[in-house]
Amino acid sequence: MSQTEKNLYNAFVGESKAALRLKAFAEKADKEGYPQMASLFRAISAAEEVHALKNLRLLKVVQSTDENLQSSFDREMSVSENEYRPMIQAAEEEGDNGAAKSFSQARDAEASHAELYKKALNHLVDETETEYHVCQVCGYVADGQAPETCPVCGVSKDHFKLVS
C-alpha cells in the first residue's frame, strides 16, 4: 500500500469518526434546547461525510453491488465471530457491564446483518423489494416489518426506525 493510500484510509477513518461524533453532538444540543448549535453540528457532520466518501471512492473500495454485498457479508461475519469476543472478555474482566452488554448486542446484531446481506442477494436476483427497520438501541436490522420485540436487546417495536 502506498503512502497516499494509507493517507486516504486514515483520512477516511478520521472524517467518518468526525461525522458520527458531530451527529451525536447535534442530538445532545437538541436535547439541551440549542437548535442552532444542533444545526451547525449536523451541517459540519454532513460536510465531514462528503470528505469521507470522497476518500473511500479514491481508495476504490466501492465495487459492483454484488461485490459490495459479498464484501459486506464477509466483513460482518469476521466482526461478529472474531473481533467482539476479546472486547467482551476484556470488559467483563474489568467489570464494565455496560460495555460488555453493548459489545454483546453489537456482536449479535452484526451476525444478523450478515444474514441480511445473504437475503439481499436473493432479493436482488428475485427483484423483490423490502423495508428495513433498525433498532435504535442495539442496531439490529429487521427485514420487512419491525418485530414486536427486538430479538437482540428485547426493546419494543416503537424503538425501531424505518430506513429507506
Image: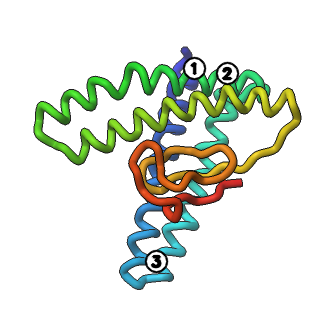
Q: Which residue is mark 1?
A: 74
Helix, strand or loop status at disc 3: helix
Q: Position of residue 7 (x, y in %)?
A: 51, 30
User: For the residues marked 3 and 2, what is the alpha-carbon distance in whole angstroms?
Assistant: 40 Å
Amino acid carrying mark 2 in the image: Gln
Q: Is 44 in front, or is 158?
A: 158
For this orientation, the residue located farthest to the bottom is: 33
The residue at the point 75 percent across, 27 percent down is 121
Q: Quadrant of residue 85?
A: top left
Name the residue tied to disc 2: 70
Q: Answer whether residue 115 is visible to the viewer in this image.
A: yes
The residue under label 3 is: 37
For discs 3 and 1, the disc positioned in front in the rendered view: 1
> Of callouts 3 and 1, which one flags the residue occurring earlier in the amino acid sequence?
3
Confirm or deny contact between disc 3 and disc 1 (CB under 8 A).
no
Quick one: which residue is furthest to the front in this view?
Answer: 148
